[in-house]
Image (cartoon, helix red, strand yellow):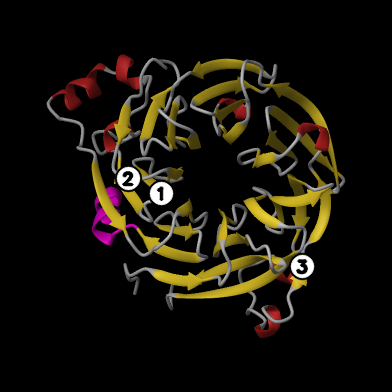
Amino acid sequence: MEDDAPVIYGLEFQARALTAQTAETDAIRFLVGTQSLKFDNQIHIIDFDDENNVINKSVLLHDAGEIWHISGSPADKAVLTTCYSKTSESRVLTCAAVWRMPPEWESGSHESPDDSSNNPQTLELLCHLDNTAHGSVACVLWEPMGDGKRVISLAENHMLLWDLQESSTKATISSSATLEGKGQLKFTAGKWSPHHNNTQLATANDTAIRGWDLRSMSQIYCIENAHGQLVRDLDFNPNKQYYLASCGDDCKVKFWDVRHINEPVKCLEEHSHWVWSVRYNHSHDQLLLTGSSDSRVILSNMVSISSEPFGHLVDDDELSDNEESQQEDKGKEPLQDSIIATYEEHEDSVYAVEWSAADPWLFASLSYDGRLVINRVPRALKYRILL
């Protein structure tokens, strides 16, 4: 019997890095990276047993340093990247690397070994993704739905496209681009588009959002002042190729059609502090999650700008061609956007929200005090979307 009540897990360490295990589509599984200055850092593998509503965890050591960003390979459950800080010659640098979990940790089916917390195993380093010449790495992005052989790292003002070879034990830069201009240019976030045959990327630096063509490594659009303050995160609508969501320190969440960048299609102002994370649901693009320093997670129903504005699928091209469906929809108003729920289980800044890769109705949020909360889309809404 599924229950809408949240399930809460405390890591006992500060944390800000969260990802769903993308390649795991059967078990509900999230990976969390810790930020501890005093102790060895860890990756907590969180398996959620939705039948019994309990969390099983395993712990792996990540002794390279504090984890700022974590991302799972889309093709191999055991492979992940982290961005972590290390001190070299009294400078703190954020580096990036590709790692492999021990074989028994790969699948979600294992019974969590009881001693894994007391006697954790260590991740195996496959290769480094840094060339210290490029400075600190903000994030590493896997090619969406790819074979796990291409990643992009954003480091300071450099964008590096890497090919992973020899089972990810070797990484070579296949192409790169540099952000040119005045002032301190530094990427803060990026998203590899799942559309256009994976040839496009969106990046954020300061208050600007830029689109890039990865074939020529050239800029294709720039939204100069997308937000009033720093842009923190971006996400592409999985079903509408030109639609992008962004969030930032101006407390706003904005929706863009990148063909018309003069102004956003829509703007949400529900948070009262910086918005760190924005995520579209992978299957139902009207569902959008945001997490903020106001300690809240908000689930919004952005149906008017979704692929189902009338409650059924509408294709961008069909809107102009198909007279009949237009007539049918003319009498109907697009469905109203709304805030579905505000979740208040956190007491600290929520740095990350992620949808499960295995269950489209389930999501996790992580606050800096190490509290991970698993929630579900309210059942009434789920059935309204499905039926």
Q: Is residue 362 left or right of residue 209?
A: left
Quadrant of the image occupied by residue 228: top left
At mark 1, the secondary structure is: strand
- Image quarter where the N terminus lies is bottom left
Which mark, residue 103?
Answer: 3
Residue corresponding to mark 1: 292
Q: Which residues are magenta?
A: 377-387
Is label 2 in contact with label 3 (beta carbons under 8 Å)? no
Counting residues from the start of the chain, the first of labels 2 and 3 encountered is 3
> Which label's residue is closer to the chain start, 2 or 1?
2
Can you tell which of label 1 and label 3 is closer to the viewer? 1
On screen, residue 340 above or below 343: above
Query: Does the magenta-highlighted stretch encompass residue 313?
Result: no
Specify the label residue 372 is tagged with. none
Total number of numbered labels?
3
Main secondary structure type of the part rendered in magenta: helix
Q: Is residue 380 magenta?
A: yes
